[in-house]
Image (spheres, grey):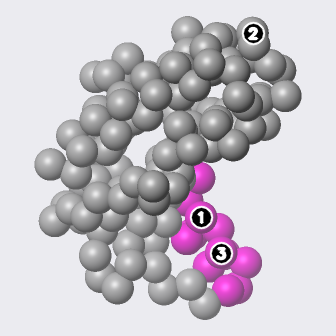
Amino acid sequence: MNPFFIVETTLTLDQASSALEAAVVAHGFGVLGHHDLGATLRAKGLPFPEQCRVYEVCQPQQAARVLGADMRLAMALPCRIAVFTEDGQTRLGMVRPEGLLNALSSDPQLQLVAAEVEATTTAIIRQAAG
């Protein structure tokens, strides 16, 4: 299975970013913060022509389940969803939570959490993309 889930959209980067923030909340997650990686790279003098925003999103109950099972998994949290451009096309995507967590743990309860989170974050991305 592809470790990435990426959807193209006709929205601009700003529109897709706003739609993502609304979809995150609508699905019971929260935006903990976001990083404008494109702007950061350009501010450091690097020629970076694309746009790239990374949103850290979390559903507290699911995060608590993961951390309650294995604190080392804090290094894999929170979930990240990117809104970026590539060759003039706006995309939204993420590393699939199931693949990530399954690579780090064989705990069946955590695999269930990862499946639930992936179902929701996939729905968030699809909703935001329109």
> Quadrant location of the N terminus?
bottom left
Q: Which residue is mark 2?
A: 68
Horizontally, residue 60 falls left or right of residue 45, namely: left
Tell me which segment is drawn in magenta.
34-46
Q: Position of residue 31 (x, y in %)?
A: 49, 31
Q: Position of residue 97 (x, y in %)?
A: 54, 39
Mark 2 secondary-structure assignment: helix
Q: 40 above or below 82?
A: below
Labelled pair 2, 1 in contact (Cβ < 8 Å): no
Instruction: Report which quarter residue 20 is drawn in.
Output: top left
Labelled pair 3, 1 in contact (Cβ < 8 Å): yes
Horizontally, residue 108 falls left or right of residue 6, namely: right
Closer mark to the observer between disc 3 and disc 2:
2
Mark 3 secondary-structure assignment: helix
Q: Residue at image x 28%, y 35%? A: 123
Q: Earlier in the sequence, mark 2 or mark 1?
A: 1
Viewer-proximal residue among 64 and 34: 64
Viewer-proximal residue among 29 and 18: 29
Q: Position of residue 65 (x, y in %)?
A: 64, 11
Q: Residue at image x 50%, y 46%? A: 96
Q: Amino acid at mark 1?
A: Leu
Q: Disc 3 and disc 1: Cα gap in Å?
A: 6 Å
Q: Which residue is mark 3?
A: 41
Horizontally, residue 10 falls left or right of residue 124, namely: left
Which label is found at residue 9? none
Instruction: Report which quarter residue 67 is drawn in.
Output: top right
Residue 33 visible? The answer is no
Q: Which residue is mark 1?
A: 37
Q: 24 above or below 62?
A: below
Q: Is residue 32 magenta?
A: no
Residue 70 visible? The answer is yes
Q: Earlier in the sequence, mark 3 or mark 2?
A: 3
